[in-house]
Image (cartoon, grey):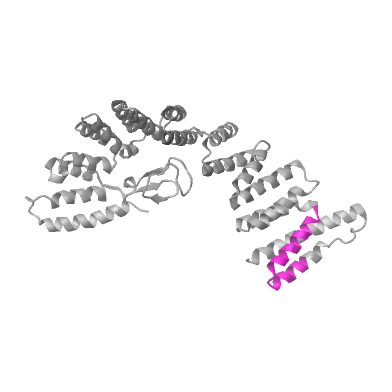
């Protein structure tokens, strides 16, 4: 344990204890028998500290603080400091002793309960933290932070119904627009119901999400999936087409679903029309690559090359350049050697693989899979395909 912060804290605690002792002397005309003067406690703690007996130094200090009701705020601060340093057991002991103390006013007790709930949360004792937070969330100035911590617990525990209830209360208290977040809670419930085969309940939750946030692309994707599961593939494609108006950058997430539905309708050629319209709304390179495949990219179709060149002239991406080089490498009529194109294609392919995936626009977390809630900062709806971050438009400079 770093002794520096103890040297800074001990004089403050000693001064507070000395003041409390002076107050008692004035009230009772004498010091209570057996009481340990705060000054003596300070020097004893300092002696232990200088002998690198940090635990004993802290024990003396804590015991001295417990003798004085006037040191409640210092004990709360000390407990919070222990928690931030990862010493959860010590923080818990301090806050538990405070709660057990008689004479605390309601505000002090509520604060001690909230701090103890934070201790339990850090220790992973989520049930205990939840019980305390439910008590705190109904009163005073701590209601808002208590509800926020409750939501974090419910998200971790995947208790989406409870998260919805607390989120609604928090929005009413703070006036924050939490509808888009609560919409994701409904989507989580819809996913659970899809897995259980209860498509009717899943549809209700997906619709509830859209009622809260009409631009919730996740709910629209779910709506299309439910239509496809019911065999209504035309309705499914119409649902997925709405993503172009909601969040165009997410159109690439439904390509395989749209293609599958067109095949189920025995109309795979219509997929090309979907892609051509999608490209007008989104700069997602995955749409261009899919269209190039549809146009016969494997056979080095000139039309496929044209589509890729048009896209690359607007903005350069490694994935697009890689596919163009693959086309040139497979073109036997090219004046340039196929080996050279092939080597360049392999190099750009390796670079493109490193740049692919997803990235949170809030904290920068990167991953290979799409997450509706960022695993890094726990924000909702902030993850995007990385092509948008790795795109260089003419006249722009890309820096990290």
Q: Where residue 217 appears, x then y in whole percent?
A: 38, 34
Q: Where residue 21 appears, x then y in whole percent?
A: 84, 57
Q: Where residue 22 appears, x then y in whole percent?
A: 85, 57
Residue depicted at x 60% and y 58%: 86
Task: Answer with the quarter of the image where residue 220 lies.
Answer: top left
**Left or right: 383 with respect to 68?**
left
Task: Say above or below: 146 vs 26.
Answer: above
What span is colored magenta in the figure?
42-68
**Left or right: 98 with respect to 156?**
right
Q: Is residue 361 magenta?
A: no
Task: Say above or below: 383 vs 87.
Answer: above
Residue depicted at x 15% and y 48%: 327
For this orientation, the residue located farthest to the bottom is: 51
Q: Is residue 51 magenta?
A: yes
Where, quadrant-wise, is the N terminus in this rendering?
bottom right
User: Which is the main secondary structure of the residues drawn in magenta?
Assistant: helix
Residue depicted at x 31% and y 39%: 252
Task: Answer with the quarter of the image where residue 228 lies.
Answer: top left
Q: Where residue 196 appears, x then y in whole percent?
A: 43, 35
**Left or right: 121 with respect to 379?**
right
Task: Say above or below: 44 vs 120.
Answer: below
For this orientation, the residue located farthest to the right is: 29
Task: Say above or below: 30 vs 205.
Answer: below
Where, quadrant-wise, is the C terminus in this rendering?
bottom left
Q: How many marks?
A: 0
């Amino acid at each position: 344990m770093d002794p520096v912060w103890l040297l800074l804290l001990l004089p403050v605690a000693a001064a507070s204890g000395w003041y409390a002792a002076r107050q008692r002397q004035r009230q009772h005309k004498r010091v209570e028998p057996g009481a340990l003067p705060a000054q003596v406690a300070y020097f004893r703690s300092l002696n232990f500290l200088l002998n690198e007996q940090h635990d004993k130094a802290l024990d003396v200090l804590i015991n001295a603080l417990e003798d004085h009701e006037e040191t409640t705020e210092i004990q709360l601060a000390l407990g919070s400091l222990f928690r931030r340093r990862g010493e959860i057991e010590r923080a818990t002991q301090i806050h538990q002793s405070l709660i057990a103390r008689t004479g605390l006013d309601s505000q002090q007790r509520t604060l001690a309960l909230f701090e103890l709930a934070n201790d339990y949360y850090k220790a992973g004792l989520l049930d205990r933290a939840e019980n305390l937070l439910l008590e705190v969330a109904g009163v005073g100035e701590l209601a808002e932070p208590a509800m926020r911590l409750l939501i974090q617990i419910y998200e971790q525990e995947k208790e989406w119904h409870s998260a919805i209830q607390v989120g609604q209360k928090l929005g009413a208290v703070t006036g924050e627009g939490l509808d888009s977040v609560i919409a994701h809670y409904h989507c989580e419930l819809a996913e659970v119901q899809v897995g259980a085969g209860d498509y009717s309940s899943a549809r209700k939750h997906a619709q509830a999400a859209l009622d809260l946030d009409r631009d919730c692309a996740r709910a629209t994707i779910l709506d299309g999936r439910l239509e496809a599961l019911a065999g209504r593939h035309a309705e499914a494609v119409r649902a997925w087409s709405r993503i172009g108006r909601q969040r165009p950058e997410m159109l690439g997430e439904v390509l395989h679903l749209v293609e599958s539905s067109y095949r189920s309708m025995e109309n795979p050629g219509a997929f090309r029309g979907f892609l051509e319209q999608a490209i007008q709304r989104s700069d997602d390179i995955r749409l261009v690559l899919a269209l190039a495949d549809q146009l016969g990219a494997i056979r080095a179709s000139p039309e496929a090359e044209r589509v890729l060149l048009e896209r690359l002239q607007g903005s350069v991406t490694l994935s697009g350049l890689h596919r163009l080089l693959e086309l040139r490498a497979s073109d036997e009529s090219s004046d340039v050697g196929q080996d050279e194109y092939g080597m360049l294609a392999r190099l750009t392919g390796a670079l493109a693989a490193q740049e692919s995936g997803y990235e949170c626009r809030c904290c920068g977390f990167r991953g290979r899979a799409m997450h509706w809630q960022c695993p890094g900062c726990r924000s909702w709806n902030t993850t995007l395909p990385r092509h948008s971050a790795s795109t260089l438009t003419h006249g722009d400079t890309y820096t990290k």
